[in-house]
Image (spheres, rainbow, N blue to C red):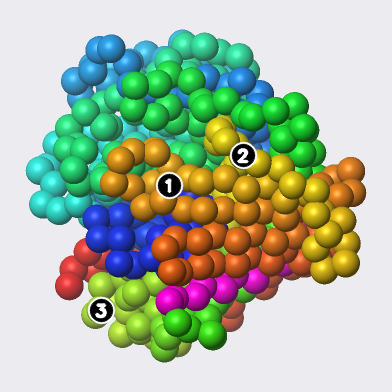
Amino acid sequence: MPFGAQKALRLWRRAGSLVPALRPSAAALASAAALAACGSGGSAPTQSAPSTSVHSQAPAISPTARVPSATALEHDVTAFWSAHPGLSSYAVQDVQYTPSSLRRVVAACTDATPASSTSSQAQRLLACAPLIYFFYSYGRQGEVVSSIDLADEIYSYAVSGAPASTGAVSILASTLRGWGIPVASAGSTTPAPVNSPEEEGFVRAADQGILAAGAVRILIKGYSEGDRHPVETISAEIGSSYSLETSAHGDATATIRITPEAAYVSGDPAGLIGLIGLPSATAARMHGRWIEVTRGTPEYTDLTTEDTISALPASILPLGVSAVTVRHQTVAGKPAEVLSWRSTADGTGSTGSVELDESLELSASPTHLPERETTNVGNESQTVSFLDWGQSFRVQAPPSAAVVPLREISGTAGTP
């Protein structure tokens, strides 16, 4: 599973109300009937993900004083689009819209159908996430303040009708943070400050080094109390436009391949149900086959923004976290810079959220590339090893005879 903002939720399944946040991209896959084909599907060249870490002093997404109605939001989005012709050719991380696809995404974001569960509430909020990401990135890259204001407006609309007790708002905030978009905590309008010039320098160098390396191999192991062997393992090769990820939890396994043209998801029935989030009937049908998620769809965007190299800095670096300590240590016979901090699983810092103790070992070289991360929650832990930085790789699409387009199974999404 992606190692992004939801990394702890892969392992801490006893976290109750946080479990629906397990995999934002799986939520999108499971709600494909509502969101399928919302992307442009165009072939215009895309731009790299924007650098939106708090170190660049980017404004944080935060609720506006005025919460728009669905009609007002639709009007404001349409008016902004008309006033900025450059948006028709703008693309970021394969999020790109035409007027018709934009209308479909806005309709999904403003869907007034009552949510019957935390999961469905989270899916409605997540329908707004690509819009927030798109307009925030456009404003950040082009210094268009009104575009960031529109992203704030969309965020305000999305969270206005979701009860805080359900955790749906935290799911949206965590998803955006995982995509590198700063989101203000309750009562705040700016990201949390960094600690010291030394800590900021290490993090900035690591941020730049990760993106410059362009590729890395990752091994994740999760341990539960009293277990000497990992209860979950994840191996992944992460690149700028390719990735290959295999997850195993008990008897459940799942694999995700990402190429510039499409993403492919496969697994055994237990993995497709428990790790990907497919309904049981669909999982049984897809055993031994690959679900194809084509470029230009929201589901493809979710996967690429979580499982490619541009997502990694926001996933592992303590961006905007206060009280980070720095220790100069020798690890495995080599000098290293070790950063330690405490955070929460949903990224909000709110009371009652699952607390994480984290440490990150950076190389002592000028690039300060990450070497190992450790996360502890109570008596459970997760280790992430980073290997083979900068070694390029390619991911092949599966045989066409084994591929089933997502649109052909989307009619069963969400059906028990």
Within 10 angstroms of label 3, few (less than 14), some, or many (20 or more) residues? some
Q: Earlier along the polypeptide chain: callout 1 or callout 2?
A: 2
Q: Amino acid at mark 2?
A: Val
Amino acid residing under circle 3:
Ser
SS category of the residue bearing label 1: strand
- Dot 2 or dot 3: first in sequence order is 3
- For the residues marked 3 and 1, what is the alpha-carbon distance in whole angstroms? 31 Å
Q: Secondary structure at mark 2?
A: loop
Q: Vertical placement of 166 versus 83: above or below? A: below
Per the image, the residue denoted by label 1 is 344
Tell me the amino acid under the disc marked 1: Thr
* Horizontal side, residue 366 vs residue 219: left or right: right
Other-residue count near label 2 (Cα within 10 Å), few / some / many at <14 / 14–19 / ≥20? some
Identify the element where label 3 is drawn: helix
Q: CA distance from mark 1 to mark 2?
A: 14 Å
Q: Is residue 87 above or below residue 83?
A: below
Residue at 75%, 27% (x, y): give it.
197
What is the x, y in percent for residue 260?
64, 56
Q: Which residue is mark 2?
A: 324
Q: Are marks 3 and 1 in contact (CB under 8 Å)?
A: no
Q: Is residue 16 magenta?
A: no
Q: Earlier in the sequence, mark 3 or mark 1?
A: 3
